[in-house]
């Protein structure tokens, strides 16, 4: 139907999360019909990001600058450090705009099944950052999965000797969660961590 | 949170149909984490399409070649011509792989409201193609909207004098359509065009 070049573009777009073959075709058409308004801006943005893409040497975030925008921001609170598994977790947390501190990306989680050991994660660098001092609180913001919690547990042990307060994200009902639809694990967590009514 | 360059990329992606701000962010992250596997192929595909993008001088399709892939395909049937409003309609029809002939893109539809007159559409070029001979059937594949049908009606009058068979797409129940959920217009069409049970 269309030329190889257009098929190649549709295929590249279809591999993006959230787009399938059908919506990728619509996106291609959208781009082709709006050469100046859509295709060129996307091309330019992609080119710039591609050229400048780098991993932050401090926290492990990906950005177009090193140190990344968060590490370079003087308004951030140096005393709080939030440790996450992946860059996507950092982005998700930072979207909430509730955490004022810095981040540290482990680059994965401990997993016996997948053979991921502590030395495969950015743990030494984390200990260095903590050892350098100035950090009061470390939020272990691992996923609420078995592997995430194993990783948090391991980190808590390694960080025990440092004079920092270790915290973790609260577990319980998600906002809008209906008891009837939640799994037993979540309900058990919510019940175990129940609080007196204020 | 992220640098301006990354925000620019997220914004450009968010303007694609099918992607919103949230999925655009996920797409950006996906691209940044897979520089070789996803970012570079998309960049290259976009660059190629951007460089070679052209409107077919025969039918009005957009493609990376002129004449377009369909017009240049020797296996297509020259005797059938399908007239559509927009390039997106051409793509949608051709995805069904049921029409073996050529296409003609009007580039819009007649609209008193939006001030689109016959001379604003690619109608002269259509008459030239038909006048050159060799076409047996013209399918007027306009949308089933008031303006689409007005356009089809107008074209039928202009094409009256040519020795071609004029046809239009069938109107009626869509596949999977439930009577209870269909509008009266569709039901009226389906009833009016009812056929004897085979």
Image: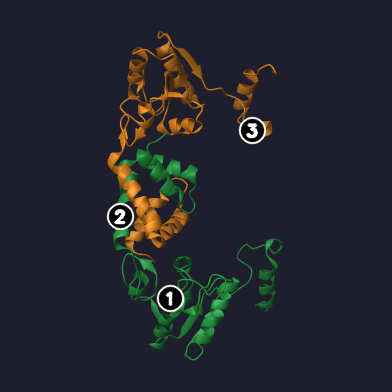
Chain colours: A green, B orange
- Tell me the chain of label 3: B
Indicate which disc, 1 or 2, sits on the residue closer to the N terminus.
2
Q: Residues within 10 Å of mark 1 (few under 14, many from 20)?
A: many
Decide: is B139 above or below A172: above
The secondary structure type at the circle numbered 1 is: strand
The residue positioned 29% from the left and 39% from the top of the image is B52
Residue beneath disc 2: A47
Marks 3 and 2 in Cβ contact (< 8 Å): no
Residue B177 badge: 3
The secondary structure type at the circle numbered 3 is: loop
Decide: is B34 above or below A75: above
Q: Quadrant of the C terminus of chain B?
A: top right
Of B194 and B184, the residue lying toward us? B194
Asked if one can make out residue B81 in the rendered structure from this viewpoint, the answer is yes
Left or right side of B43 for A115: right
Residue beneath disc 1: A104
Of A139 and B80, the residue lying toward us? B80
- Which quarter of the figure has residue B75? top left
Kindly report the distance in space between the C-alpha atoms of the residues bearing marks 1 and 2.
Answer: 27 Å
């Amino acid at each position: 139907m269309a030329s190889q070049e257009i098929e190649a573009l549709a295929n590249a777009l279809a591999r993006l999360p959230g787009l399938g073959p059908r919506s990728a075709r619509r996106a291609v058409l959208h781009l082709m019909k709006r050469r100046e308004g859509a295709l060129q801006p996307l091309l330019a943005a992609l080119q710039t990001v591609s050229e400048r893409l780098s991993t932050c040497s401090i926290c492990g975030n990906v950005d177009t600058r090193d140190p990344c925008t968060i590490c370079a921001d003087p308004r951030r609170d140096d005393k709080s450090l939030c440790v996450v598994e992946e860059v996507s977790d950092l982005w998700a947390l930072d979207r909430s705009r509730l955490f004022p501190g810095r981040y540290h990306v482990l680059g994965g989680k401990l997993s016996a099944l997948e053979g991921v050991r502590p030395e495969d994660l950015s743990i030494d660098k984390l200990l260095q950052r903590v050892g350098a001092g100035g950090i009061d609180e470390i939020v272990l913001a691992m996923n609420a999965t078995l592997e995430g919690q194993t990783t948090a547990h391991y980190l808590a042990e390694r960080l025990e000797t440092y004079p920092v307060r270790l915290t973790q994200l609260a577990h319980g009902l998600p906002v809008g969660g209906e008891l009837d639809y939640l799994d037993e694990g979540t309900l058990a967590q919510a019940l175990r961590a129940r609080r007196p009514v204020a």
